Amino acid sequence: MSKDLTQRLKKLNHQADWVGLREVKGINQHCTARNGKFEQNSTTIDHGIMVEALVNGQFAYCGTADLSDHSLQMACDRATHLARHMSSWKIFPFNTDHRPAERGQYHSPARLSFTPATTGEIMDRLVDATQKMKVSDKIVNCKAQALLIEKEITLVSTAGSHIHQHICSFASNLSATAQEGTETQTRTTGSPCQQGGLELLQTQILGSESERIAKEALDLLKAEECPTGVYDLILAPDQLYLQVHESIGHPLELDRILGDERNYAGWSFVQLSDFGQLQYGSPLLNVVFDPTVDGEYASYAFDDAGLTATRQYLIKDGVLLRGLGGLDSQKRSSVPGVASTRASSWNRPPIDRMANINIEPGNSSFEEMISGVERGIFMSTNASWSIDDYRNKFQFGCEYGRLIENGKLTKIVKNPNYRGITSNFWHNLKKVGDPSTFKIWGASNCGKGEPNQMIQVGHAVPICLFENVDVFGGTS
Ligand SMILES: [Zn+2]
């Protein structure tokens, strides 16, 4: 990283009204083992500086991977030129208030740091995990993966901002596939991911988890198909987090609602006039934007526009209050937002993204939820997803289902799926699990924008019960 980015900014010649520099160094390491053997270990290092310039009310960007003073000056000249040129066609007159001066630091809560020497320890653990999955000859494929991300971000501006953030995270997945005749079933650990250091290797990749998923894959081979019909549905956090991501997170992104973002099923059924008005779901639904949760995958203290990140209600008692939009979208839309302007790296401008989007726990225990259901299904671990351009009609498939009959968990069912319409589904939320059911999940691969920006998101949710859901069997 540059020794003193503020000094480098001061040395630049420019005629812009405001200039910001965002230096990012990211190191991603992927490790994979399969069927008791090492398969892959790859490391990607990405380092550069993005220059953002404001001229005549218009922002523009230019990034450089050449970190020399000459190249940084050229990037600054280009960003300034683009901003001046585009200002004749601007859609909104921005000013220096839209990039407030902030100073501060953030460090992920990592107890044990990653070093080149830890790669051997990780690989040994992954190989061992795949060996432990081989509990039967019917287990035909055992895979274990780990993804380590370390990112340093420094942001300075001519207004006086100086922000430094150091993010360290660990994600993994174990996957066991069982086969008998033409029937194949896969069970995984659902890709747990958190901020932290090597200590997460010890908590995420457990021998007992290897054995559990392998045995459950074998159980699924013998299981009946999930029935079709209208059922009460209880979702485990490792499925519900993706339901939140697709049917609450993405539709609330203000740039989609403003019409900027149409890629990747990129519109929204939500309108600007809905904020403060729309009953998004049942009164039990409380959703927060919370980048302050210790160890959650997308925690940070400042977004990539330099705005201080705080916990905010997006939905309270079922009513939609705020959008997922940083300062630029908030000014354009006059809708309250959050500090969620994020860029995947130095070579992308920041756009409206999710960070940690969480459902607050309620007061029902898991046992209470099960005992109150006469005819239902408990589903866990996401297997597939599909949602339309308006983020309205959706269909999800899960790895593992259990029937609920007269207040008791009974038979295992394979290939469980459900479908619905966003608003009806969240209105049918009837019970929200207590803190003992609350778990942190997230995803490494939320894609958005063109050119593509892949970022990490966090979702912490309790177990929840939904009434009258269309459920069906079969691979989707
Ligand atoms: Zn996404």
Image: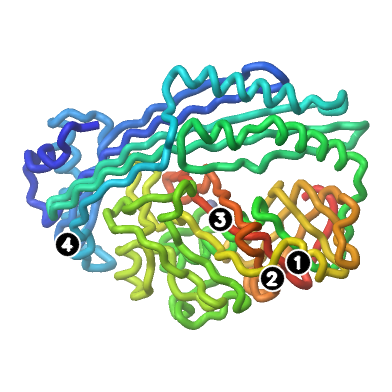
Task: Name the residue carrying label 2.
Answer: 431
* Number of numbered discs: 4
Taking the spot 45% from the left edge, 50% from the top edge, the residue there is: 294
Label 1, label 3: how far apart the Cα atoms are = 19 Å
Foreground pick, 322 / 166: 166
Considering only order in the chain, which callout, 1 or 4, is on the residue closer to the N terminus?
Answer: 4
Q: Would you identify the image quadrant in which residue 241 lies?
A: bottom right
Tell me where residue 325 appears, x and y as whole percent: 39, 63
SS label for mark 4: helix
Q: Which mark is residue 369?
A: 1
SS label for mark 3: strand
- Three-letter amino acid code at the position of disc 3: Ala
Q: Are marks 3 and 2 in contact (CB under 8 Å)?
A: no
Query: In this rendering, does residue 136 appear at all?
Result: yes
Label 4, label 1: how far apart the Cα atoms are = 52 Å
Q: Under 8 Å from ligand 1: the CB of mark 2?
A: no
- Three-letter amino acid code at the position of disc 1: Met
Label 2, label 1: how far apart the Cα atoms are = 7 Å
Of circles 1 and 3, the one toward us is: 1
